[in-house]
Image (spheres, grey):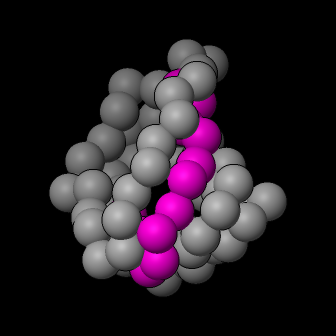
Amino acid sequence: MVTVTMRAGRFWKLHKHNCVETILVFKGHLKEHLSGDMVGAAEILQFDKFESHLVESLSDSIFYVEFKRP
């Protein structure tokens, strides 16, 4: 698991992984632009293996990222 701090208005460019990715927000708000999903504290974004995603931090945010190979 990795802890990420991201300032408001920053993006993770469009990408994908060869594993399942789970993002758990501790503080702040994130938006996933391909699905339109928006999450805040104690909420989760999850991406399947090889699922493209583009994440923006809507406010200063801290979140945890876990990668799992099914």
Q: At x 30% / y 77%, what residue is drawn?
A: 9
Is residue 4 visible to us here? yes
What kind of secondary structure does the magenta stretch mostly adopt? strand
Quarter containing the C terminus: top right
The magenta stretch spans residue 58:
yes
Residue 17 at x, y percent in the picture = 35, 33
Give the side of residue 4 with respect to residue 8, left or right: right
Please name whichever residue, 22 or 51, is drawn nearer the observer in this view of the structure.
22
Please name whichever residue, 22 or 8, is drawn nearer the observer in this view of the structure.
8
Residue 4 at x, y percent in the picture = 46, 42
Residue 39 at x, y percent in the picture = 64, 72
Give the side of residue 44 with respect to residue 66, left or right: right
Q: At x 20% / y 57%, what residue is drawn?
A: 13
Range shown magenta: 55-67
Quarter containing the N terminus: top right
Residue 47 at x, y percent in the picture = 53, 48
Query: How many labels sit on residues?
Result: 0
Give the side of residue 49 with respect to residue 15, left or right: right
Please name whichever residue, 57 or 68, is drawn nearer the observer in this view of the structure.
57
Please name whichever residue, 5 or 34, is drawn nearer the observer in this view of the structure.
5
| Up/down of 42 relative to 1, above or below | below
Which image quarter: residue 38? bottom right
Which image quarter: residue 34? bottom left
The magenta stretch spans residue 33:
no
Q: At x 44% / y 49%, what residue is drawn?
A: 5
